[in-house]
Amino acid sequence: MRMRLKLKTVFVLYFMVSLLGLIYALMQLGQRCDCRDHDMSKDQQISQLRGELQKLQEHIKTELSKKTDVPKIFVITPTYARLVQKAELTRLSHTFLHVPQLHWIVVEDAPQPTSLVTDFLAASGLTYTHLHKLTPKDRKLQEGDPSWLKPRGAEQRNEGLRWLREMGAAAKGKEAAALEEAVVYFADDDNTYSLQLFEEMRYTYRVSVWPVGLVGGMKFERPVVEDGKVVRFHTGWRPNRPFPIDMAGFAVSLRLTLTNPQARFDGDAQMGFLESSFLQSLVTMDDLEPKADLCTKVLVWHTRTEKPKMKREDALQKQGMGSDPDVEV
Amino acid sequence: MVPIYCLPLLRNIFGCTDNRTGATKKDFRLHGSCITENKHITNAIQIKYIHQRPPPWSDTLPTLHIITPTYSRPVQKAELTRLSNTFLHVPNLHWLVVEDSAQKTALVSRLLENTGLNFTHLNVETPENLRTQKKLKNIRTPRGTMQRNLALRWLRENINPNSSHKGVVYFADDDNTYSLELFEEMRWTRKAAVWPVAFVGGLRYESPKINSQGKVFGWRTVFDPRRPFAIDMAGFALNLHLILSKPQAYFKLKGVKGGYQESSLLQDLVTLSDLEPKAANCTKILVWHTRTESPLLVNEGRKGFKSGNAEIRRIFKLDVKIRFCFFKHNHLLNKKRRDLSELALIC
């Protein structure tokens, strides 16, 4: 009898304990788990996640570089030192990083390459060529001049063309064959480019054109296309120019550039005629290839960045308390 | 013999975008568990158009919730385009775009769909009485306040504070410039992280002051450095859990002095000692407060001029007129920024 009672008690106790345990566990459901004992230390976790992040980023890069069967795009960007230069180049590089087979030719308006641009390009992850060419003083815009007074970047773009022609002449075999289909585009460092634009320009036989937004005092300027051919240009300013088109509105095939070694930008050209000075020796309006859905879509915008106000900085500099010049901006 | 109650805790795992072509889930909602990492990387690479490639999503990286208020103006599409080109490089990014409009515009909707990013599209119109007022400065609401608050509310309504979801909230205006390094610096924010910002406050850069213990003790600014948080909107990020655990903290709408908007939120969330300095102890610039010029659409609607000189003269005259006007009215404007179009109205 005693034995049986004892067993019964044991079972009852066992049942009670189990029930209590179940209730406790159910109450814990949905509560925040204090996993401090089980987790690795926060720092270990963070470094593990960082490693994973790097792995992901490298994977993207390798995938992108695998696309070698498309024509190359050579982008020539003239640039000059000013406060917003690094910011402009940074966000431009973010766009270019998405474009396969893009070779960025950065030409500084400087007597020698600056460390800012050198270091920036090295860290950018892009395929690039770093050149420099100083604009002669008489052609350079002075402080306070309106931006449209003198054409800018002509010498730098010509330097880019010179490098391309040198490279084209030296190329042999497979490399030369690849260059046959390549395209040259002039991209200023303050404009905004959509990714689709590069896919539109990639297959250019001679010179392709498309609309450009926010230029010439209009929402957009564009070539007018009829029956698949460019017949005139819709622009609010001087439509009688040979090519009333912005620098960002056309791309030239490398082949055409190499077979016309005399074609270059005229640094002394009148305002608005810089593009024409280059294009008129290469192509006529008839030969232009309209892109961007027969020039009905805006894929590039002629944005301009404000000059940052430095009044307080200037005041501090005068007192000898300016910001640390070692901090690169 | 002993029953083991091994009930796993419920985990609300947030879904991520299905990166396959044509079947992308763009809304950031409560989903089932994410697809495994490897499938994501494979699916992430689009063959046809590289620009539709979304970045790979990871189950373990903290999510960056980027809040961008935006409003209609000629450069809006360009700004959002280049911003999205930057964001497309950042893994685990959730973009909350809040329009200052009565309805969601087709322009922004289409743009967001085409980027392939993980986004949430919201909108709230700032009422007329809270918009920029020339005279009644004290009741003026800084631009974007209502939109940022809406995004904060969305996060609080859609993310369970008890979930294991890890995230960081950052306010990114659509005209600034962000380096990719910045996002990786802010990803590991425990409470609130800060760093220098270029081109604000009339300086090359503004930055927190860091002492030898690596703590923030002040602000390197000229404009009102005694503000509780003398920092630009682009200069800090907050841990999502902090936002969710203090649901009353919002940007103040009214009675906010110029430059105090950031403080109006931060003072309810953190103290100076909570701030984590990033960007090599606040010595590197990873974000620039760039501003885009408003394009002068003077020729809009015109078919073109026969005499180019007339147009040059007109633009030159307008340019000179505006500069003279600005000079003349400088004292009235208190040297603050004004749109050229507004100046044209004054003159």
Image (cartoon, coloured by chain):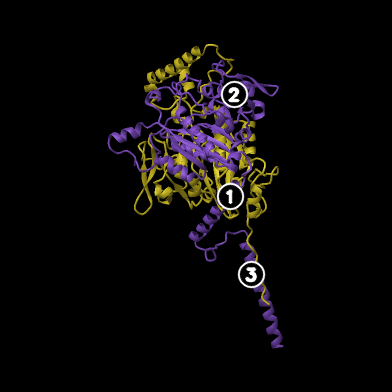
Chain colours: A purple, B yellow
- The residue type indicated by label 2 comes to Val
Q: Please tell me whether residue A54 is drawn above or below residue B172 in the rendered image.
A: below
Front-most of residues A113 and A58:
A113
- Three-letter amino acid code of the residue under disc 1: Thr
Q: Are marks 1 and 2 on the same chain?
A: yes
Q: Secondary structure at mark 3?
A: helix
Q: Where residue A134 appears, x then y in whole percent?
A: 40, 31
Element marked by disc 2 = loop
Q: Which mark is residue A21?
A: 3
Q: For marks 2 and 3, give the CA distance.
A: 86 Å
- Residue B24 horizontal/vertical position (percent): 68, 44
**Badges 2 and 3: C-beta atoms under 8 Å apart?**
no
Q: Is residue A189 visible?
A: no
Distance from the alpha carbon under mark 1 to that under mark 2: 38 Å
Q: Mark 3 is on which residue type?
A: Gly
The kind of secondary structure element at disc 1 is helix
Asked whether B86 or B248 is in front, the reply is: B86
Res. A62 mark: 1
Q: CA distance from mark 1 to mark 3?
A: 53 Å
Q: Disc 1 vs disc 2: which is toward the camera?
A: 2
Query: For residue B210, which numbered disc appears in the image?
Result: none
Q: Position of residue A122 (x, y in %)?
A: 46, 45
How would you rate the neighbour count of disc 1 (Cα within 10 Å): few for under 14, some for 14-19, many for 20 or more?
A: few
Answer with mark 1 or mark 2, whichever residue precedes in sequence: 1
Compare residues B1 and A100 and report the one nearer the observer: A100
Q: Subunit of mark 2?
A: A
Image: B101 above or below A2: above
Q: Which mark is residue A283?
A: 2
